[in-house]
């Protein structure tokens, strides 16, 4: 029996095309999902789109189309970018899917019947022309941030969820499950800034707009935002208040919700309280990742500094972009995107270290042995260090991946590439080739190099899936084992360029 692993991204809001900063999360989740599959887990990887709300209703009106047409277009665009990034999600879910809507209605009713949802009054600052409630902090110079008109204090009937009922239970849970919120700095922030001062009940319905899931027993209300969005994690794997599917029992609780640090509060406070109300177990871990920002701050259309993933992929190739975002964004602090650094990484790491190693080794094997290599086992002391490093890679990568230090895991693999390049300098195959009695030694050296490349290609798959496949194809191997194999026989294919050097002066 394989161990299961359920990983999700947050669902992307369908208000517009996602930029590279919004694309980081799906690539990060993909690397983790692929890694778990590599390690033999039965993986379920879910992503998708969050499609309801007033903002979308307004945008659709501006575009002169229905909200459904609007979200169909944007969801299609988001999915195509996830595909361009070569992400291996198992299911792309949408909150306008019929099944999701039906189950959200049942969840709402169940919470209402239980007394966890009650009818109350929502008070806020209201802009009549925009039909929008705003909070004090959203106002711009005291006026509506959308149209600049005056706002007035207004109340509307709304349903509320009793967050306060679960507050103590949640504090206790978080304190007993130190792994639940990562990174740890976020955990302290949630407990000290939000939970301990006391939770306000949460507004979970609205009557001021229509683009939402109707509350089926009170049809002037639509379900408001978080109750609709967060429940995607269970409605799409077969949760049903009247009896869940076997699929649900298999996958729930999720092993990891991967989300942006800006929505960690909703995932570590609202979501657990909803689950407690439904008497379901909580996800094992919520990780709030840092952001990818520009050198002049957060990416935004109004700043004019937006970069899209598909443009970068067209220019540099998918694995170069994946490498950059996975490698450059640290575990706990924001990463900066610059074209210069991207090009530097391509030339420095992907061309010089990885590409050259593979190309030189395969070329030498062709030149000296017509691409046929066996291990002649003429061993010298210098081999041991390389082989020891190859065999230590599995554990090193595992440690980093368990801590979700993706960049660190990639570094471990590149250390072996680097060591292999150094091994070429140390063993100088071109001089061995000049001496007839060193032929078996030369073949042993090249064999060791190909084994190093093979094991690295296996481990690089979660991060650079296309490159991994191309390397394994060039060395003509289907051996996916994680350690140095001393008894293979290689008939290599032709060397091909893996990454093109970029002429930075031309960019
Ligand atoms: Zn307004």
Image (spheres, rainbow, N blue to C red):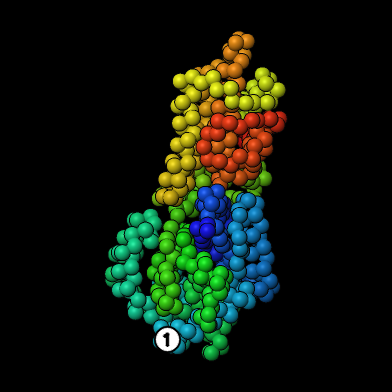
Q: Which residue is mark 1?
A: 114
Residue 388 horizontal/vertical position (percent):
45, 31
Using the image as rendered, state which of residue 416 and residue 16 is in the foreground: 416
**Which residue of the protein is positioned furthest toward the bottom in this rendering?**
217
Q: Is mark 1 within 8 Å of ligand 1?
A: no
Residue 296 in view:
no
Residue 278 horizontal/vertical position (percent):
44, 78
Which element is circle 1 on? loop
**Residue drawn 34% across the image and 79% down it:** 165
Residue 2 in view:
yes
**Residue drawn 41% across the image and 83% down it:** 116
Q: Is residue 13 above or below residue 123?
A: above
Q: Residues within 10 Å of mark 1 (few under 14, many from 20)?
A: few
From the viewer's perspective, tell me whether residue 498 is left or right of residue 379: right
From the viewer's perspective, tell me whether residue 164 is left or right of residue 411: left
Q: How many marks?
A: 1
**Residue drawn 42% across the image and 45% down it:** 399
**Which image quadrant is residue 235 in?**
bottom right
Using the image as rendered, state which of residue 474 and residue 103 is in the foreground: 474
Residue 307 horizontal/vertical position (percent):
58, 50
**Residue drawn 64% across the image and 26% down it:** 373
């Amino acid at each position: 029996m394989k161990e299961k692993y359920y990983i999700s991204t947050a669902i992307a809001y369908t208000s517009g095309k996602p930029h590279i900063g919004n694309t980081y999360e799906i690539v990060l989740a993909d690397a983790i999902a692929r890694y778990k599959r590599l390690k033999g887990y039965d993986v379920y990887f879910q992503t998708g789109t969050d499609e309801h709300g007033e903002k979308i209703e307004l945008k659709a009106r501006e575009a002169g189309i229905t909200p459904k047409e609007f979200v169909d277009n944007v969801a299609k665009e988001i999915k195509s970018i996830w595909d361009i990034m070569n992400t291996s999600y198992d299911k792309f879910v949408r909150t306008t899917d019929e099944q999701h809507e039906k189950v959200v209605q049942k969840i709402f009713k169940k919470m209402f019947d239980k007394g966890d949802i009650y009818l109350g009054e929502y008070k806020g600052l209201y802009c009549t022309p925009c039909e929008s409630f705003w909070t004090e902090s959203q106002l711009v110079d005291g006026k509506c941030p959308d149209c600049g008109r005056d706002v007035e204090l207004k109340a509307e009937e709304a349903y509320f969820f009793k967050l306060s009922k679960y507050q103590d239970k949640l504090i206790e849970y978080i304190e007993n499950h130190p792994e639940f919120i990562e990174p740890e700095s976020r955990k302290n922030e949630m407990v000290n800034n939000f939970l301990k001062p006391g939770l306000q009940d949460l507004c979970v319905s609205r009557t001021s707009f229509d683009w939402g899931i109707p509350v089926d027993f009170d049809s002037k209300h639509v379900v408001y935002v978080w109750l609709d969005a967060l429940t995607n994690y269970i409605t799409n794997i077969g949760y049903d208040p009247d009896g869940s599917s076997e699929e649900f029992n298999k996958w729930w609780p999720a092993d990891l919700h991967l989300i942006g640090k800006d929505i960690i509060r909703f995932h570590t406070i609202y979501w657990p309280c909803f689950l407690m109300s439904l008497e379901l177990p909580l996800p094992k871990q919520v990780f709030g990742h840092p952001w990818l920002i520009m050198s002049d701050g957060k990416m935004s259309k109004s700043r004019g500094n937006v970069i899209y993933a598909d443009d970068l992929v067209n220019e540099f190739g998918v694995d170069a972009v994946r490498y950059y975002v996975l490698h450059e964004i640290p575990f706990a602090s924001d990463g900066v995107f610059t074209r210069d650094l991207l090009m530097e990484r391509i030339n420095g790491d992907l061309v010089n270290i990885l590409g050259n190693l593979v190309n030189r080794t395969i070329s030498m094997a062709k030149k000296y042995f017509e691409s046929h290599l066996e291990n002649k086992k003429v061993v010298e002391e210098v081999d041991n260090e390389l082989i020891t490093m190859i065999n230590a890679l599995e554990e090193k990568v595992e440690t980093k991946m368990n801590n979700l230090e993706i960049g660190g895991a990639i570094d471990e693999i590149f250390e072996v590439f680097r060591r292999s390049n150094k091994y070429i300098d140390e063993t100088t195959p071109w001089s061995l080739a000049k001496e007839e009695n060193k032929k078996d030694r030369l073949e042993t050296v090249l064999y060791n190099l190909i084994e190093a490349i093979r094991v690295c290609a296996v481990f690089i798959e979660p991060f650079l899936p296309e490159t991994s496949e191309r390397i394994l194809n060039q060395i003509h191997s289907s051996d996916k084992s994680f350690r140095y194999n001393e008894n293979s026989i290689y008939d290599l294919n032709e060397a091909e360029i893996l990454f093109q050097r970029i002429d930075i002066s031309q960019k």
